Amino acid sequence: MRFHNALHGNPKQGETVYKSGRSTGLTEDRYGLPAVIITRGLDIHGNEVPVATFEHIVYGPSNKPFANPGDSGAFVYTKDAKVVGLLVGGAERVNAF
């Protein structure tokens, strides 16, 4: 799962985070360390340029996914309801936000 714009700071590594999405409902997993991902994008002239994103990893022992297609736009939050991000994407084995 990918989430952006931590409003209340980043959770601690290993802290449980939650999400309530349209497809998967309420899910929880553990927060991992943020990672920098380099992808390709286009500048205003149509030239390919590198684009860096900061992605926060969510992992855990649960056997169900933290997020699925349709969950994008869901808030990611801590147990005390502090919003720490917005879900924007995922991968099969890990999720980033």
Image (cartoon, rainbow, N blue to C red):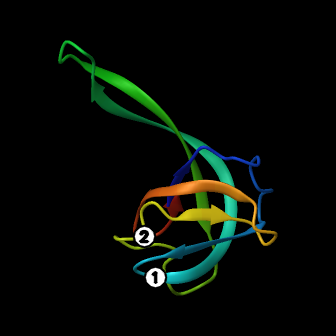
Question: Quadrant of the image for the C terminus?
Answer: bottom right
Figure check: 25 above or below 38: below
Q: Sequence-wise, which precedes: disc 1 or disc 2?
A: 1
Residue at the spot 42% in from the left edge and 70% down from the top edge = 71
Instruction: Give coordinates of residue 46: x percent, y percent.
Output: 17, 18
Which class describes the residues within 10 Å of circle 2: few (<14), some (14-19), or many (20+)? many
Figure check: 16 above or below 36: below
Instruction: Give coordinates of residue 44: x percent, y percent.
Output: 24, 15
Task: Give the number of the disc on residue 1.
Answer: none
Residue at the spot 64% in from the left edge and 77% down from the top edge = 28
Residue at the spot 60% in from the left edge and 84% down from the top edge = 62
Indicate the secondary structure of the residue bearing disc 2.
loop
Instruction: Give coordinates of residue 86: x percent, y percent.
Output: 54, 55
Name which residue type carries label 2. Asp
Q: Which residue is mark 2?
A: 71
Question: Quick check: 40 left or right of 93?
Answer: left
Indicate the secondary structure of the residue bearing disc 1.
loop
Residue at mark 1 to residue at mark 2: CA–CA distance: 7 Å
Which class describes the residues within 10 Å of circle 1: few (<14), some (14-19), or many (20+)? some
Q: Which residue is mark 1?
A: 24
State the image quarter where residue 72 is shown.
bottom left
Residue extending furthest toward the left:
46
